[in-house]
Image (tube, rainbow, N blue to C red):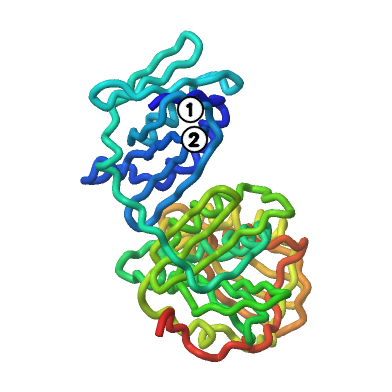
Amino acid sequence: MKFTANAGTLAEHLYRVQGVASAKSTMPALTHVLLRADGQQLRLAATDLDLAMEDSVAVNVSTPGAIAVSAKHLFEVVKALPASGEVTVTLGEQNRVEVKAHKAQFKLVGVGAAEFPAIAAVSSREHVDIPGKELARMIDSTIFCVSTDDARYNLTGVYWEAANGGKLLRFVATDGHRLAVIEREMAHGVAFKPVIVPKKALIELKRLLGSNPPDDLVVKCGFSDNHAVFTVGAVTLSSRLIEGQFPDYEQVIPKSSPNVVRVSKQELGEALKRVSLMSPDKSFGIRFHASKGGVRIESQNPTLGEAMQEVDVEYDGPDVTIGFNAHYLLEILGQVSEGRAHRAQRPPLPCPRAANRRP
């Protein structure tokens, strides 16, 4: 195998796939990226057995062939080369991979392509197309609530469902302490059985979309019995779905609230950061005392001291005292785009059933 490519372009494609490869594994091949050069194209693949990514890039192939090499080290080598120059990758004897660019030369130890795990082809039966910008926003608005507790496996992903007769696409996430729900109206309607998409798959999907996806980018999402497939341009990301039952989240969402507080997002965020400096280390506990025209935020730590700040708000209800985790509130504020954050009345959700991922 021998091919020549632009170093900057190759580094970009290696960056995409190397995030999927396992950092550590009892199977060395899972830390590798499979390179397959053929017909003026280089196909790249990485997997951790639960998640797989495949990508391709145009290169100048002198000799076709395939090899698996450490994803992290190959990426770091190519990234360190001048981005505007060319890099030549050659497979030598004993699976040694030579990387040359100008006066720099590296040799990496690879493993035969036959040792790389086969990536199963996933045939999806249900599809939904989502604009990239909307998908990125929906992921950002829910992923921070996903549980990190492996003992609650059914909460370690984001629940996707077609709601309100397919007119709405809804994402839900919870870790048992907080819950996030976001909905998007679908012009053409959607129809698929509810699924739970793992957090790692969504992290990689968001990384593919970038911080500002193009307006015309559409992500094709397909689902089978136990897999999801996401197509972003030339990249295919496939993931096992989480088996199990998602909790009946609608039961914990108040149908209405008589107490509505409107406050500047910036002022509230700054106050929370200050007051939480004196909150208990593990719970980040703070107290809100709401009365007409203002909110007093307090925290107390027996070993450090206490803090208090008052914030002007729009509130005309009864006096209320309530405690929160400051860290949770700050994460929520990070997803609020409006200038003023508020807790408002919410109409009943249109999908009353519990969430069984698959029949």
In the displayed structure, would residue 160 be above or below residue 139? below
SS at mark 1? Answer: strand
- Pointer 1: what residue? 61
Please state if 107 lies on the left or on the right of 81 as rendered: left
Please state if 212 lies on the left or on the right of 276 as rendered: right
Which residue is the extreme one toward the left? 26
Q: Do the CB atoms of the residues marked 2 and 1 lie less than 8 Å apart?
A: yes
Q: Is residue 185 visible?
A: no
Q: Is residue 40 visible?
A: yes
Q: Residue at x 55, y 34 (%)?
A: 58
Type of amino acid under label 2: Gly
| Residue 133 x %, y % | 68, 57
Number of marks in the rendered image = 2
Quadrant containing the C terminus is bottom left
Q: Residue at x 53, y 30 (%)?
A: 59
Quadrant containing the N terminus is top left
Pick the residue in front: 84 or 145: 84
- Pointer 2: what residue? 39
In the displayed structure, would residue 101 be above or below residue 183? above
Pick the residue in front: 17 or 330: 17
Q: Which quadrant would residue 293 be assigned to in this image?
A: bottom right
Q: Residue at x 59, y 62 (%)?
A: 220
| Residue 36 x %, y % | 41, 37
Type of amino acid under label 1: Val
Q: CA distance from mark 2 to mark 1?
A: 7 Å
| Number of the label disc, if any, that sits on residue 310 | none
Q: Which quadrant would residue 142 be assigned to in this image?
A: bottom right
Q: Residue at x 68, y 48 (%)?
A: 212
